[in-house]
Image: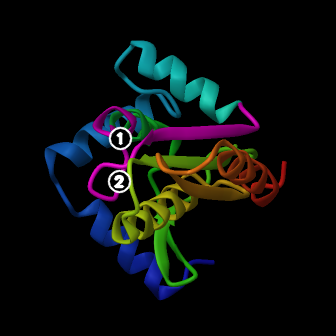
Amino acid sequence: MMDIKQIVFRQAYELLPTLKDEISARIDHKTPGMCAINDAGRETAGKMIGSDVTIFLSPVTFGGYSSTLKKAVDRTRPLLSPPLRASGGKLGHVPRYSKYPRIIAIGLLPALDVDSERLYHDLAIRNSHMLHAPAHASAVIYGTESDDAVKQHMNDLVKEAGL
């Protein structure tokens, strides 16, 4: 049963007649779970949804992913189901699949940057929720860290992601 928030969010989403929404609807309804653009991005998204874990690894750029990784994450849009619902005070997509991969996000920074690190972790959490990851972990690794510290980050990420 839908509550009033779900109905309002759904109606608001359905009433936004933008080109983006028209394209999204075409992609989501004519080829459910598959991007209408037939290139390597389609194959990558399919492999991601079929995996047990997906690792996002990139330099941290202004607190976010590199433009290359951002494009790859954006190409996972067709894996999301078009209907939206409110859950835990947040608006999100209804799960399309019965299984989703865990997400591990690793950001690389040359030197300490607390603000960029915080933003990176927040982004990783939001993307993990959007992609319905059953578990997620993120870390920022600095170029100044020792090999032992990097190994410890990797061990911590594996544990945190439940692997």
Name the residue that disc number 2 marks. Answer: 64
Cα gap from disc 2 to disc 1, whole angstroms: 8 Å
* Res. 70 mark: 1
Q: Quadrant of the N terminus?
A: bottom right
Residue 116 x, y percent position in the rendering: 35, 63
Residue 109 x, y percent position in the rendering: 40, 50
Judging depth in this view, the residue of 24 and 161 nearest the camera is 161
Decide: is 73 above or below 123.
above
* Res. 139 mark: none
Among all residues in the image, which is located at the extreme left? 18
Q: Is residue 145 left or right of residue 58?
A: right
Decide: is 154 above or below 92.
above
Whether the residues at callouts 2 and 1 have beta carbons within 8 Å, the answer is yes
The amino acid marked with disc number 2 is Gly
Label whose residue precedes the other's in the sequence (2 or 1): 2
Q: Residue at x 42, y 27 (%)?
A: 35
